[in-house]
Image: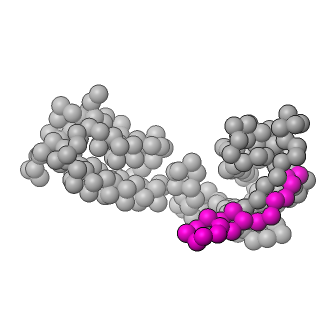
Amino acid sequence: MKSYLENRDQRVSVYNNKPHNLSSSWIQVKHGVPQGSILGPLLFLIYIHDLCLSVNKLANPILFADDTTIIISNANPDEFQKNINSVMTKITSWFQSNLLSLKYNKTHFMQFRTKKQNEGKIQILVPNSINSNINSTKFFSLIIDNSLSWKDHITAITSKLNKAWYVIRLLKPFLTMRMIYFSYAHSVLSYGIIFWGNSHAHHTNSIFKIQKRIIRIITNSDSRNTRQQLFKHKYFHYHDNTFSPCLSL
């Protein structure tokens, strides 16, 4: 392992259409994980393993590759703010001790609350400013908002399904509908549906309407067919607990 990590050099090259590409000088890698290597992901996990240990008494850290989420909860507002600043101090200290830098401009703070609950004013004491008190953020490709209404996530899905509907309409004469549906629509609908599938109908109606349009194209149905007729087609199974039919295998 020592021979694998030591005596490594790296440089940055910029490739363009010009006769000569631009490259920096070679420098020796004194710390970190070799990029693009097979052992890279494993070495990185080992490298950041003790990050959770530095804050697990005050918070619940969640690590996935190089994305880190820290969940802090406390019923007392004063203790809540105190824990937040303690965690940020410990995180900053850990990064400095391990020769890493925390990207504060990509660090978000979101406070979960009910619709009737007023948002508390939290002052985060860190060397640099972070995006504090945001209303929504991405978490494993799910857009989570501070009231867990899933409104922003459903809006994003609606946009993707509109594009899928357009592609399906164009490609129908050339490809099988089953392959197109699974590639462009079903994958979008099914991802994370266990979380956002039971959202208020006011938010999900837009998805439902686009879905019906897609089904009408696939089944050659017209606007006079009812929802029950569409979802009882031989190509679909309808699930009452969600509004998402899936193609029969």
- Depth order, front residue of 210/114: 210
- Vertical comparison of 103 with 45: above or below: below
Rendering coords of residue 37 (x, y %): 71, 41
Residue shown at the point (54%, 58%) measured from the top left: 145
- Vertical comparison of 126 with 154: above or below: below
Q: In this view of the protein, can residue 212 be seen by the observer?
A: no
Residue shown at the point (22%, 39%) measured from the top left: 176
The image quadrant of residue 91 is bottom right
Residue shown at the point (47%, 43%) measured from the top left: 192
The image quadrant of residue 110 is bottom right
Prevailing secondary structure of the magenta residues: loop
- Vertical comparison of 220 with 106: above or below: above
> How is the protein colored in the picture?
one colour
- Depth order, front residue of 208/42: 42
Rendering coords of residue 189 (x, y %): 38, 45
Q: Quadrant of the N terminus?
A: top right
Rendering coords of residue 148 (x, y %): 52, 53
Q: In this view of the protein, can residue 152 be seen by the observer?
A: yes
Residue shown at the point (16%, 47%) measured from the top left: 173
Count of marks placed on residues: 0
Rendering coords of residue 21 (x, y %): 65, 67
Q: Does 200 sit left or right of 17 as displayed? A: left
Residue stretch rendered in magenta on the structure = 13-30
- Depth order, front residue of 75/130: 130
Q: Quadrant of the C terminus?
A: top left
Residue, far top: 249
Answer whether residue 26 is magenta in the image: yes
Q: Does 82 sit left or right of 193 as displayed? A: right
Q: Does 102 sit left or right of 249 as displayed? A: right
Answer whether residue 137 is magenta in the image: no
